[in-house]
């Protein structure tokens, strides 16, 4: 057994399966696609290694590598009410979504790798979902929200997806601190998605950075987002360009576009040869 790998053992005690998990490491354990369609299916057979589904002790699905192959989903959680965490899981090759969350609430997806799926994480008719510290690489869509409100997408890396973030009819979501790069479309807010807060993200080398068909919030009172295709004047050198960045022709703007961003390396200093 290699050091750092997840250890999961099923023990039959009085007919009850108990999953004992070690600390997940860089070599995740293989697991088949996981399907949970009610509160009673958070079981060891479905990759749940701990937790009781309460706010202080959520169910935990952790440390798996799922090659979805021809399956529609790598992990699907549908129609549940319990608290759960999907953590340190890698999903590749899902025909519909690496992780699908539908008609659920109180879920978290943390530190996962979603690679080469149709959609990395699909969130449908769900609320109070937090997606954080994940990597989305070469999916058709990175995250797609559909009729889902009051969710959080925080501190993720989106690289080489067709559309990194797609919101349909989804309102009052928070999108903060993400690196969104090398995509055809960075953030696409459609079907009257409104009231979403998109702050402190870095949009880098996308063909199209953002589109919004209804008003959304692209800056706080002092800071907005970083846009690699934008340069203006920062006369007072406060790290904010002095003119707004236009999101679309209907009037959405980032009023305080950032000159630099912690996730974007600073350009090399100019030399006589440059």
Image: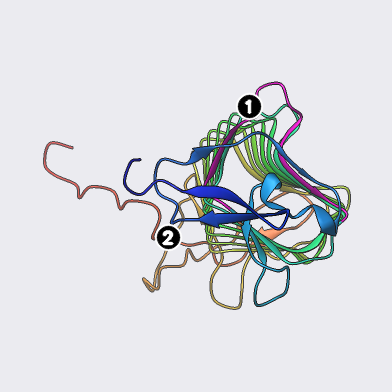
Contact check, label 2 and label 1, Cβ < 8 Å: no
Most extreme residue toward the front is 14
Q: How far from the left and from the top, in percent, is residue 59?
A: 67, 62
Q: How far from the left and from the top, in percent, is residue 148?
A: 83, 57
Q: How far from the left and from the top, in percent, is residue 104?
A: 83, 58
Q: Quadrant of the C terminus?
A: top left
Q: Secondary structure at mark 1?
A: loop
Residue at numbered disc 1: 93
Picture disc at residue 259: 2
Above or below: residue 207 compared with residue 86: above
- Residue at position x 71%, y 66% from top? 217
Q: Earlier in the sequence, mark 2 or mark 1?
A: 1
Q: Quadrant of the N terminus?
A: top left
- Residue at position x 75%, y 55% from top? 42
Above or below: residue 165 compared with residue 42: above
> Which-is-in-front pick, marks 2 and 1?
1
Q: Main secondary structure of the magenta part?
A: strand
Above or below: residue 237 compared with residue 132: below
Q: How far from the left and from the top, in percent, is residue 50?
A: 61, 62
- Residue at position x 83%, y 57% from top? 40
Q: Residues within 10 Å of mark 1 (few under 14, many from 20)?
A: many
Above or below: residue 63 compared with residue 218: above
Image-quadrant location for residue 197: bottom right
Picture disc at residue 264: none
Image-quadrant location for residue 221: bottom right
Asked whether residue 187 is in view, the answer is yes
Q: Secondary structure at mark 2?
A: loop
Most extreme residue toward the left is 272
Choose between 248 and 140: the one closer to the eye: 140
Span highlighted in magenta in the image? 62-79
């Amino acid at each position: 057994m290699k050091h750092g790998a997840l250890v999961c053992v099923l023990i039959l005690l009085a007919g009850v399966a108990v999953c004992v998990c070690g600390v997940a490491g860089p070599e995740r354990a293989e697991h088949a696609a996981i399907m949970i369609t009610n509160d009673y299916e958070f079981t060891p057979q479905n990759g749940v290694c701990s937790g009781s589904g309460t706010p202080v002790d959520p169910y935990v699905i952790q440390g798996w590598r799922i090659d979805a192959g021809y399956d529609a989903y790598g992990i699907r959680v549908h129609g549940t009410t319990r608290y759960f965490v999907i953590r340190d899981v890698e999903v590749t090759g899902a025909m519909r979504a690496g992780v699908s969350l539908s008609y659920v609430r109180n879920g978290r997806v943390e530190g996962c790798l979603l690679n080469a799926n149709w959609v990395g994480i699909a969130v449908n008719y769900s609320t109070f979902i937090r997606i954080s510290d994940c990597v989305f690489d070469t999916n058709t869509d990175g995250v797609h929200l559909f009729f889902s409100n009051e969710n959080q997408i925080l501190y993720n890396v989106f690289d080489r997806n067709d559309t990194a973030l797609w919101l349909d009819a989804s309102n009052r979501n928070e999108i903060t601190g993400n690196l969104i790069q090398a995509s055809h479309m960075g953030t696409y807010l459609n079907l009257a998605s409104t009231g979403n807060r998109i702050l402190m993200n870095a949009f880098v080398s996308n063909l199209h950075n953002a589109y919004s068909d209804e008003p959304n919030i692209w800056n706080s009172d002092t800071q907005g987002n970083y846009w690699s295709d934008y340069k203006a004047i920062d006369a007072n050198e406060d790290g904010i360009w002095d003119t707004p960045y236009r999101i679309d022709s209907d009037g959405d703007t980032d009023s305080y576009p950032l000159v630099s961003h912690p996730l974007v390396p600073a350009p090399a200093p100019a030399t006589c040869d440059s």
